Amino acid sequence: MTVSVHHHYWMGEFIDDEEAGRRLTGLPAAVEAALAESLETETVLAACDALGAALCDPGHPVRARLAAHLPEGEDPAVLSELGGLLGRRELTRKLRRELGGATPGRLNRADPRESVFEAWAPVGLVAHIAPGNAATVAPLSIVEGLLAGNVNILRTSSADTLLTQHLMAELAALDASGALAARIVVLRFPSSRQEWLRLMCAPADAVAVWGGEAAVEGVAAHVPAGCRLVEWGHRISFAYLTADAWSDAATLDALADDVCLLEQEACSSPQVVYLDTEDEDEVFGFAERFAAVLAARPPAAAGSAAGSGAGSAEGGPDPAEAAELTTTELVARLEEHLGLTRVFAAADGSWRVMADTRSPLTASPLHRSVWVKPLPRKRLIATLRPMRRYLQTAGLAGSPTDIAELSRTALAAGVTRVTPVGAMLESYAGEPHDGVYALQRYSRRVAVQADPVRFATTACLDDLARPVVLPRPAGPLVGKEDVQEPARRLTRADAELYFRSGGSTGAPALSVFSYDDYDTQMHAAARGLLAAGYDPAADRTANLFYCGAMYGSFISFFSVLERLGGVQLPLSAGPDHAATARAIVDHGADTLFGMPSYLWQLLHAEADVLRAYGGLRKVFYGGEHFTEEQQRTLKDTFGIEVVRSITYGSTDLGPLGYQCTESSGGVHHLHADLHTMEVLDLAEDRPVGPGETGRLVFTTHARRGQQLGRYVIGDLGREVPGRCPCGRHAPRFELRGRTGDVMRVATYFFNHRRFLELAEERGGHRGELQVRLDSTDARERLTVRVERTATTDPEQLREVFLAGYPELRSAVAERLLDLVVEAVGSASLDRSATSGKLLAVVDARG
């Protein structure tokens, strides 16, 4: 009986040869179906980060399952190395460096002042032809294809284990949506099966192949016209030393590190050492000194990289490599009789240094075999440029001036990478490979031009096309206190920017960001501001948010305007209202950014000047709310046409929501590409019913370092059903106050928002309102403090509150509570010292 072996992974399941052959014939249709469904970058990042964490945990069952598929003799530490490369930090940095942002596939405005939308789009299907005996290359290649949004089909050799297949299966299992599985195929077959290779490449939009010229040519024959051939072929690297450097013992030790690490198996290992000289005696003398340094090095370890390529499992060269080593050394020794060479070698053949008076680049047979040649810098380009297709790394040693000059010369000769000697094999996250960025090779830059009038407030075209679907939040609820101490323990790379909250609802809290996270959030806030009707091509803005004491509002909206390219007067909120009004008039500002309480004070203090100016058209506010009556005053008294929320957010989480031109009051769209939102019951961890008010809980996904999942922000709100008339798919919610605005007084619960609504709707009040709670000898006292205006009548307002608030009327009637209404000047109301926000509730009961 024949047993079917399932060693192919196809879009979520393991299959055998017969099924793989059948499915290959239908590959074009499968690719079209997969590309018809969207793939969010966050889906890839979240799954990779989870898999990376599992691979780095020695006790994790996923790591144990995958370790069983490592090649014989492979160190399990390679799984930890792979796990580190799959982490969110590394992949996000790669996305930013190669494609310019963490969500490169979204059609955002290329210039906020123009209605042109650009994005990086997948090429479609990427066929990967992986090298043999390189455990991490194949899975990382697929991850690169996924980050670019592509469908990926990869071929491993018949000699490889099933590590890549099972790695990809584990990755796909971490995505509940199935979008990753639909974009991954891993086949295992020999190079002799040319029909399968043809079926892989025929529908491909890019083919990535590793190997030498013969391997690339074998694949290229199957690449259709117009398809990108991405070659990751063999490269050659060299070291270049100036006179000061080659006489330095530390330089020779560093050079020996580059030679011995991985036994020259890496493309970035030095095969030739060039000296900046024409003197043959200096070449021979250096070769002898360097041979002594290599002789002092311990031999290659068993199972090292010397044997991890085509070599033997014992760490030495295989018979073909041994023959090449012997031949190369023998020819060099024969040329000693002509005065062209001099050979210094170990008796056991474990290393050799071959000095050669001829400058042209010569490939080394590897395994600690090094050529030493003269090459004065004036001839460097002429000598190396003929080999430019094969050049990769130049390790330089010399003075700072020498390094600067030689770097430019080496790059002109065709080198793609320059490092210090001793660091030739080191790399950094997002480093170009062989002179290109892989993600750009697997992507297309696309653009959409739209009508500037109809799309004036559209910052991202995708918002009108489809909803963003991010991974579902999981885990316990967390609050401000849960993230304070972890924030103080963040690494330097994740803690680059510190903010403190305004303290309007308690003690100021610390929030920490990386600059990358801050940049992502400021771009999101900028898109939201465009949706709200800000016009960066025409508006002239006075930034009047509070600044200082690590408070973030002024700085953040300075950054937002910078990204929008808007005209800005960075005035900040200050006590000299006359000077602020004068600056607004003198510089023609027509748009104000700021806290409602400060803007309200400014406009009324300088009402005569600003009404006479008549140039104010827009107000964008944040941190608090303008009531409907206050907005009516701004429009009727000052001629302001647009009064809208600049953003809804918090110091911890950044921008959470934005208003569009169809939004009013507390209604906002969710920044759905950054966060997911839940509305939970006030007392229990369960969703409320449709349209009901509950606690707003946010999970932020685009964040490095701090993991803010299921964060209870302290605000109340409700989901707004249906799609917004503006056409955006982003969910909507309506703010309904803060949990801190709900007061328990005299056994009753009272809400600040209710007092404000009654004062406006029934009492005609248009100013600010604050509730103060005190204890007296007899009972508790609730004082409603309202901003004094010409028509303010405290007694009338008291009757309005008693008539319209049954619970309040009962508490007063039962003599459980004293109700006082007093009119005060705006300056007498209690405010946050940091942000200037009005404190809605002041609880002084002790």
Image (spheres, rainbow, N blue to C red):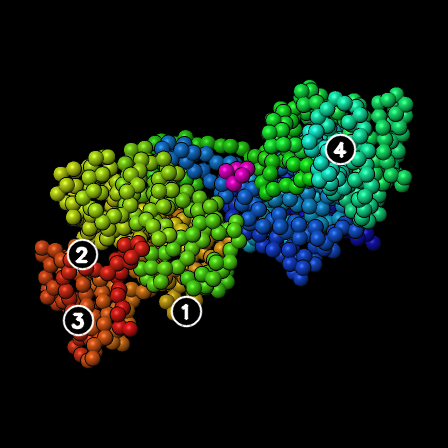
> What residue sits 67% from the left and 62% below the top?
59
Distance between the Cα atoms at labels 4 and 3?
Answer: 88 Å
- Dot placed on the residue nearer the N-terminal end, 2 or 3: 3
Q: Is residue 774 above or below residue 791?
A: below
> What residue sits 74% from the left and 56% below the top?
68
The quadrant the N terminus occupies is bottom right
Q: Position of residue 797 (x, y in %)?
A: 13, 64
| Residue 809 on the magenta span | no
User: Where is mark 4, residue-wise?
Assistant: 271
Which segment did they paint magenta? 96-100
Distance between the Cα atoms at labels 1 and 3?
Answer: 32 Å
The quadrant the C terminus occupies is bottom left
Q: Is residue 130 above or below residue 243?
A: below
Distance between the Cα atoms at labels 2 and 3?
Answer: 21 Å
Q: Of the residues shown, which amino acid type is indicated by label 2? A: Ser
Q: Which mark is residue 519?
A: none
User: Where is mark 1, residue-wise?
Assistant: 684
- Contact flag, marks 4 and 2 (Cβ < 8 Å): no
Q: Which mark is residue 819?
A: 3
Q: Which mark is residue 826?
A: 2
> What residue sits 20% from the left and 50% below the top?
600
